[in-house]
Amino acid sequence: MSGIGLLIPVALLLGLSGLAAFMWSLSHGQFDDLEGAAERILIDDEDGEE
């Protein structure tokens, strides 16, 4: 039973830190261009490297 007293605060701390990291990434524009990286890999290079 004493293990639960330790695991619940640890789980809450991990959940809140994950939520804080997600909110930070939203406020700093990490999710602004979701399709850009996926489409950029399909574009050929202009240099003509072979």
Image (tube, grey):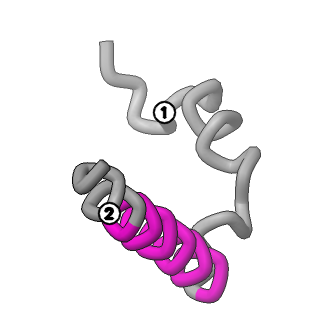
Residue farthest to the bottom, as pictured: 27
**How packed is label 2: few (under 14 Cα within 10 Å), some, or many (20 or more)?**
few
Q: Which residues are magenta?
A: 9-27
Residue occupied by mark 2? 5
**Quadrant position of residue 10:** bottom left
Residue 45, disc: 1
Q: Nearer the viewer, residue 46 or 17?
A: 17
Determine the residue positioned at 72% across, 51% down.
Answer: 34
Determine the residue positioned at 56% across, 30% down.
Answer: 41
Residue type marked 1: Asp
**Quadrant position of residue 9:** bottom left
* Left or right: residue 14 compared with residue 23: left
**Quadrant position of residue 27:** bottom right
**How packed is label 1: few (under 14 Cα within 10 Å), some, or many (20 or more)?**
few
Q: Nearer the viewer, residue 4 or 35?
A: 4
| Element assignment for label 1 | loop
| Element assignment for label 2 | helix
Q: Nearer the viewer, residue 39 or 6?
A: 6
Q: Nearer the viewer, residue 19 or 13?
A: 13
Which callout, 1 or 2, points at the residue further toward the start of the chain?
A: 2
Q: Is residue 25 above or below residue 41?
A: below
Q: Is residue 14 magenta?
A: yes
Name the spot of residue 31 as percent of width and height, x first. 67, 64
Q: Is residue 42 magenta?
A: no
Residue type marked 2: Gly
Q: Is residue 11 above or below residue 37?
A: below
